[in-house]
Amino acid sequence: MPAAKSIRRAFVLLIVLLLIAGWLGWRQLQGPELPGYRLETRPLVQRVVASGEVDTQSLVQIGSEITGVAAERHVREGDAVKAGDLLLELRDDEQRARLREAEAALQQLIDSTRPQAEASARETQHNFEQASRELKRRQVLFDRKLLASEPLEQARRAELTARAVRDRARFAAAALAAGGSEEQVQRQRLEAARAALAKTRIQAQVEGIVQTRDVEPGDLVQPGRTLLTIARSGSSEILLPLDEKNLAPVELGQAAKVVADAYPERVLQARVSFIAPSVDTTRGTIDVHLDLQGPADFLRQGMTVSVNIETGRREQALVLPNDALLARNGTRAQVLRVNAGVVERVDVRLGLLGTALSEVVEGLTAGDLVLAGDAEAGQRVRVREQPMPRGIQD
């Protein structure tokens, strides 16, 4: 009996070993187990992601139209200003003196010079009329042979002299009359003096935020020197130095999302408004500008932002993770497809390209299995299916 039990145990053990060996042999024939993906269709959004900074389309430089000394500064960096706000005052002693001088000259014209000219015109008119009457009287006497020619000639010369004096007085009075040329000159001098005084008060021409200041009380300022810079309100934009290799899918008008590093919870909508015509050869980048679609008062000039530009969208696309793509060259690539447990190398054409997923438009169909690892064509393998990654393109 003991011998029979030993034989049965040995027989059972042998069968188990044969089954294990067969199973191992079968597994060996199937090949190694490698990670892979099963292709599927899903919505796909392609985006270009890059870092940029807050810039402004309109940076107004504030300077002085005249040479002077700064007397008082009313703003500094970060101050919000409106059009007409006083930014800077210059010393105005000289301008005020010239204004008082111009005012006095005009008042003197009105109160003194003009009345004198009018009186002189009346007097010369009276003298001319008297000289004319005297000439007529002597002409009558001469015609009656009661007067010699010499007194008559003297009367003519006196009348001519009085006429010339009267005419000069009339011209002078007309020039000095209300609205005349002399008053216009004096009023222009007065306006020039007022304008010169106004130039000592430097005001904001636009609404915005003061970005820089380069003046302090006591500084000598001259025309051509920038004293303050103001970023015009509502002119903020995003400047994106985009790597030139990512330029192809970017077009004007594309939607984008902007997130400031300092405010990660506030997502701003923007659109591509400008693409530079040339590449910066030192950096290999091209400047792309984006207009913000809404107010963003919290942004500051030069602030770093993350930009996400939507460059393409498919509601249903056959997608494949990028780590399964081999020999990628633009929109062409190769994949290792597993067909009936055997690896085969397949050429594919890509559509939308992203950092996590890409669209396959030619070479594969939904349900195909592709390897994420390396293998030889013709090799038998077993696929361990991996879940599709969910990158920013999903």
Image (cartoon, rainbow, N blue to C red):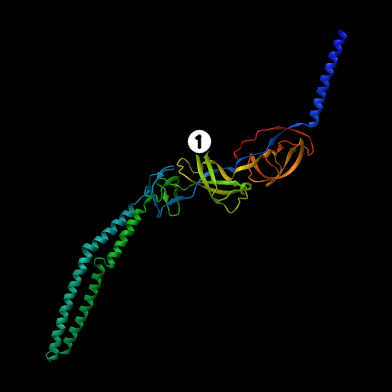
Measured as percent of width and height from the top left, residue 160 is found at 21, 81
What is the crowding at mark 1: few (fewer than 14 residues within 10 Å), some, or many (at least 20)? few
Task: Read off the residue under disc 1.
Answer: 265
Q: Residue lying at the far bottom in this picture: please name it.
A: 145
99 relative to 220 in the view: left or right: left
Please state the horizontal and vertical placement of residue 235, each as a whole percent of the image: 46, 48
Tell me if residue 162 comes above or below residue 330 in the rendering: below
**Image quadrant of residue 150?**
bottom left
Q: Position of residue 13 (x, y in %)?
A: 83, 17
Nearer-the-camera pick, 69 or 282: 282
Which amino acid does the dot numbered 1 rest on?
Glu
324 with respect to 130 (left or right):
right
* In the rendered image, the vertical position of residue 126 relative to residue 368, given as above or below: below
Residue at position x 19%, y 86% from top?
153
Q: Residue at x 68, y 36 (%)?
A: 38
Residue 177 appears in which quarter of the rendering? bottom left
Give the structural element (helix, strand or loop) at label 1. Answer: loop
